Amino acid sequence: MQANFVLWGVHLRVVGICDSKSLLVASDVLTTELDDTTLTEVCLVKLKGSSLLTLGNSGQCKVFSNPEAMGKIIDVATLLGRSTGLAFIDCSASSETIGVLNQVVDLGCCVVMANKKPLTSSMEDYDKLLAYPRRIRHESTVGAGLPVIASLNRVLSCGDPVHHIIGSLSGTLGYVMSEVEDGKPFSQVVKSAKSRGYTEPDPRDDLSGMDVARKALILARLLGQRIDLDNIKVESLCPEEMGPNIMHVEDFLVNGLPLLDKGIQERVEKASSNGNVLRYVCVIEDSRCEVGIQELPKNSPLGRLRGSDNVLEISSRCYNQQPLVIQGAGAGNDTTAAGVLADILDIQDLFVRQ
Amino acid sequence: MQANFVLWGVHLRVVGICDSKSLLVASDVLTTELDDTTLTEVCLVKLKGSSLLTLGNSGQCKVFSNPEAMGKIIDVATLLGRSTGLAFIDCSASSETIGVLNQVVDLGCCVVMANKKPLTSSMEDYDKLLAYPRRIRHESTVGAGLPVIASLNRVLSCGDPVHHIIGSLSGTLGYVMSEVEDGKPFSQVVKSAKSRGYTEPDPRDDLSGMDVARKALILARLLGQRIDLDNIKVESLCPEEMGPNIMHVEDFLVNGLPLLDKGIQERVEKASSNGNVLRYVCVIEDSRCEVGIQELPKNSPLGRLRGSDNVLEISSRCYNQQPLVIQGAGAGNDTTAAGVLADILDIQDLFVRQ
């Protein structure tokens, strides 16, 4: 990130940066900002996996550690929230940001999230966070930078009732399901996905479906469903008796995973005999929100999906015969960052004098 | 359209409506608006194909005919442009709106267009219209309500360089090209498209490719190409000697069209022998902007396209291995109106007090 971010004449002032333990903030947030030198130092420190605390104070900026940092964040939000529409950007994967985000929203700040946790906590937290919906953007929580949330919001905003959403929102599971379709054993495909870096270090984090369930919850809540993560029917591709508390990851990969091959193979063959393929999808309609394997026509946008692309199909009054389809890379640092930046620019538009 | 348009708490004030010859305007645009009764009357009058002039003055509103109407429009824009961000909505298909749109932009008004003409006139007019780009929306000019422009603007705004755009942006030609792929004669497919209401009354208006060329020009200019309609290489599917100035439409359908069958059939077969299909597409990259038939892999998003859906593939730094794909119905009154309404709400967000 650059302080003097010049892009088609856009200048973004970065006044503070947090990591899990500390806050680096411009010496006077009203008049100064973190300059390029400081921001480059921050990048180097974080690339090494060190804490912002190692940077120390300078004329340019001050560093605060917890719990002092938290008070300082609220001070900055109070100063700049209502007056400038200061945006808080949450690119963590932590539930610990929920409290502070709810506070800064109350102080008039905008919030941009790549973090799914604040949107998939309790309905009470969700309602607090969305108290001023026009100040919230979170494109990169579903399908990374793919314009899924922006497009769905457009459909909803113009009063086109959404009947049905179905999507493949895990690049990992998308890859796995399209590879087993070719007759490769499930265990081999999962191991190959792991070696290509498509999976989490423990592939059971992907196979559990919980990441997809969080994305489904975000979409379902956008459509007005007042549900929690617990209300979603989630099909895990990893049986409970092979869970992380019972088996080590290496044990799972060598001894557990191959036991799943036959079941998957039988389902693939059954689907194929119906002219269908299996896809790991989320389905959202009316009060239904489900995540799991479904048999889908080979010749549908989801059935034709190959590799790790995400796909979302939206059916509505306007898109009733054929769905509105959005497809593309749904993971990766670049696309996630691009989605966050587009959100920041979009939301800051609301605060620029015309 | 309703005056008291209540949608998730949104109220849109409609203060005036134009047709080609006249303007109906609220009696005092500062304090009043066109009420539901008046707007319903307007709908009935226009459904019958009559002029707004038939409505006459009332306590609620006044009717002005040209040239007085034009002066009144500028008065309203002067009063409400800078103070409220008054939006002018152009759903015509006329070049005659260009002058007034350029004037109201100067007066601080927003502009929402479904009309392609103002964006595909000279670069001089384009630059005037886009003088304040944040006040302009035109989603429904390309692919009706499909979130093509919004998504492309997001990609561009976050500095993700677009390398290549390819799209099938004519439902009519999309239908024709996917039907001839099955071996049906071109002439028969065009006639069938006409009888289904997919084509313009004179199908040569579709076959000429000029509608696609205008959409391509809008996309190319968004990407920064400073070109005019004349600079686009357009392949017409109707040879000059069968043009509207030479043959009557009936003569063309009966005697002209069948002469084209053999040529198209040969191209379809040649493509098929390479494992490809033919699609009528726009291609935009670097300084290139072309519209015409291309041979494309059967297994690409465009190659798999069937029926009258539109598809746009965007390749960029973030979407380099697989493109970002947006697909769905790209024509129809409902989707076009939905796109216009989403644009209006989006742009009015900029003028609502936070």
Image (tube, coloured by chain):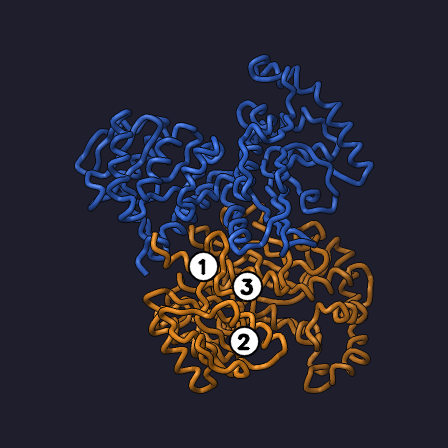
Chain colours: A orange, B blue
User: Between marks 2 and 1, how big is the CA–CA gap?
Assistant: 42 Å
Vertical placement of residue A308 versus B337, above or below: below
| Disc nearer the start of the sequence (3/1) | 1
Tag 1 subunit = A
Disc 1 crowd rating (10 Å Cα; few below 14, some 14-19, many 20+) is few
**Residue located 66% across and 28% down the image:** B189
Splitting the image into 4 quarters, where does residue B109 fall? top left
In the rendering, which numbered label is found on residue B23? none
Mark 3 vs mark 1, foreground winner is 1
Where does residue B234 sit, x and y in percent of width and height? Answer: 62, 29
Relative to B17, B134 lies left or right: right
**Residue located 52% across and 38% down the image:** B218
The residue singled out by tag 3 in the image is A140
Q: Amino acid at mark 2?
A: Asp
| Disc nearer the start of the sequence (2/3) | 3
Relative to B18, A111 lies left or right: right
**Residue located 37% across and 59% down the image:** A351
The residue singled out by tag 2 in the image is A230
In the rendering, which numbered label is found on residue A11? 1
Closer to us: A201 or A165: A201
Q: Is residue B195 visible?
A: no
Secondary element under disc 2, as helix, strand or loop, is helix
Vertical placement of residue A35 versus B15, above or below: below
Disc 3 crowd rating (10 Å Cα; few below 14, some 14-19, many 20+) is many
Tag 3 subunit = A
Closer to us: A90 or B92: A90
Secondary element under disc 1, as helix, strand or loop, is loop
